[in-house]
Image: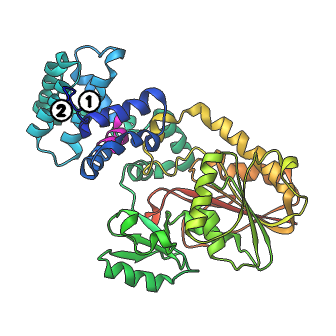
Amino acid sequence: MSNLKKKKKPSARELAVTVICTVTQQGKSLTEALTLADVLEPRDKAFCREICYGTIRWYSRLEGLLNLLLKKPLKAKDSDIKVLILTGLYQIIYLSTPDHAAVSETVSTCSAGRKSWAKGVLNGVLRNFLRNRATLEKSIDTQLNQQFSHPTWLIQQLQKDWGDQLSHILQANNQHPPMSIRVNEKAISRHQYTKQLDEAAIKSHENPFNSVGLTLDQAVNVDQLPGFWQGSCSVQDSAAQLAASLLKVEDNQRILDVCAAPGGKTAHLLESTNDSNALTAIDIDELRNQRVIENLTRLNLKADVLTVDALETAEWFDQQPFQRILLDAPCSATGVIRRHPDIKLLRQATDIEALVKLQSQLLEAIWPLLEKGGRLLYATCSILSAENSQQIANFVSRHTDAQPVTIDAQWGQACEFGRQILPGQDNMDGFFYACLTKT
């Protein structure tokens, strides 16, 4: 018999600390960091995910509370202890975990690590919070950035762009997003698919703004969705499902999808048009492009998928103009914070200027590829005017052949140019769309 001891698997709470530290210290996305939790059993993995998303969603508020509770700040090398305390506070405030269990389990997690000296600190801080919770929370909530757990620069920008809608946006960003799906109408109708969901005891309601969208009453694993792996549906937010109809593709047209990965809108365009159209999907990231290919294969759809730099058109454009172009521009992603709360920690004010410049460069590079009379749809998942309406205003002022098209719709709200959905409106993510035709 071997004397070697089997290595003990980390607990959900231990891995949650590791994941959160990976985001806050290494700058990795939460989605990427959460792959570390793949070693856990499904139930523990779900709990780890809940702690990670919740703690990061409320990170600034929890950190503010911790600063009030500590007599002196923890050292930088003890950031894992700091994060562990934050996860304990999250469980007490936002989860249904009993107070005593949240304290004891958090302290036990510390005991399992190499910093057992911190047990007293954790125990003292968490119990102090429980004794003075009402006073501490009242104190911290006098400041918007801590009350709503958003960076100050973003609050100031949203205040400038949206005024009295600021509070709604901040609250919506902290809500749990719904799970929406897009039915592949080439494979099955929405009515038929709804019946299959009902038979699987999955409740849903129809997206009122298109004929293929459904929002589930409760999120499920994709394996539970009838026919998912056979191409019956895809997971996609209701706001993103609007792109295909806005582009208004007709028969025998060439379509270009710029910055296409991971391919949700690419697939929807193909699902909603006939086989007489030819679609080219381009993205600069080869790994992300692989996801486009995987999605198209699952849905039994075909497109030319190219890994190229959209700005270097001379290297890939075949001189045959496109009648329809979708530019799903890189952006701040400030409209999808409720799905990706790590954006609040990772995105910086200085990033916006660079993104606005890149968006402008992409518009300039791609516009010559559009045929006269053709239509370009500009899309972002941002809610910042500089990336959206103002970006299009600046472009139109430079191009006399760019004619804005008014989007007449029941969703979102009209801007000077284009239409904006704010987070949570009609249960959708924050999205911006603007249509241009070439005269």
x and y percent of residue 427 in the render? 43, 64
Mark 2–mark 1 CB contact (< 8 Å): yes
> SS for tag 2?
helix
Disc 1 target residue: 84
> Which residue is at a point 13% across and 23% down the rendered structure image?
124
Please state which of residues 363 and 103 is positioned toward the viewer in this rendering: 103
- Quadrant housing the C terminus: bottom right
x and y percent of residue 127 in the render? 11, 29
Location of residue 202 with respect to 163 vertically, above or below: below
Say if residue 9 shows up in the picture.
yes
* Magenta stretch bounds: 51-59
Disc 2 target residue: 106
x and y percent of residue 274 in the render? 70, 80
Q: Which labelled disc corresponds to residue 262?
A: none
Location of residue 114 with respect to 357 vertically, above or below: above
Location of residue 231 with respect to 384 vertically, above or below: below
Tag 2: amino acid: Thr
**Dot 2: few (<14), some (14–19), or many (≥20) neighbours within 10 Å?**
many
Location of residue 170 with respect to 272 vertically, above or below: above
